[in-house]
Image (cartoon, rainbow, N blue to C red):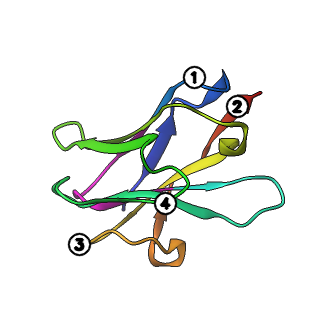
Amino acid sequence: QVQLVESGGGLVQAGGSLRLSCAASGSTLAMGWFRQAPGKEREFVATISPSGGNTAYADSVKGRFTISRDNVKNTVFLQMNSLKSEDTAVYYCAARYYIGSVYSKEYPYWGQGTQVTVSS
């Protein structure tokens, strides 16, 4: 059974930075970060392959966010820089076998989410 626990959310001013962490139990899986703002659907943010050699980002965060992983600690990170008010959302990490995906429905394992609030 895969369990995912996110941490690192909080309140930050626009232009600031936060780093989210997602600690995983079980196998080394492909991981993704998604977010959901109030009244909106969950959207893809970033994904990383099990080895960490392949990553992909949503256009809205490209150049500002970086996904990485430490497979010794079985933890995935999302470094968020130059935050904007529109980045405010609950951020979720998700896991699936073999390769990453931009589609939330393809991830069977999810964390509980962590709130990120960016004040303007």
| Secondary structure of the residue carrying numbered label 1 | loop
**Does the CB distance between marks 1 and 2 fall below 8 Å?**
yes
Calculate the distance from the C-alpha at mark 2 to the C-alpha at mark 4.
18 Å
Residue 82: image quadrant is top right
Foreground residue among 74 and 119? 119
Which is more N-terminal, label 3 or label 4?
Answer: 4
Q: Main secondary structure of the magenta part?
A: strand
Kind of residue sitting beneath label 3:
Tyr
| Secondary structure of the residue carrying numbered label 4 | loop
- Is residue 112 something that shows in the picture? no
**What residue is pinned by disc 1?**
16
Which is more N-terminal, label 4 or label 2?
Answer: 4
**What residue is pinned by disc 4?**
58
Give the magenta part as a residue range: 21-33
Which is more N-terminal, label 3 or label 1?
Answer: 1
| Secondary structure of the residue carrying numbered label 3 | loop
**What residue is pinned by disc 3?**
98
Q: Is residue 62 left or right of residue 49?
A: right
Which is more N-terminal, label 2 or label 3?
Answer: 3
Residue under the point 49% across and 60% down: 58
Relative to 44, residue 26 above or below = above
Residue under the point 23% across and 58% down: 27
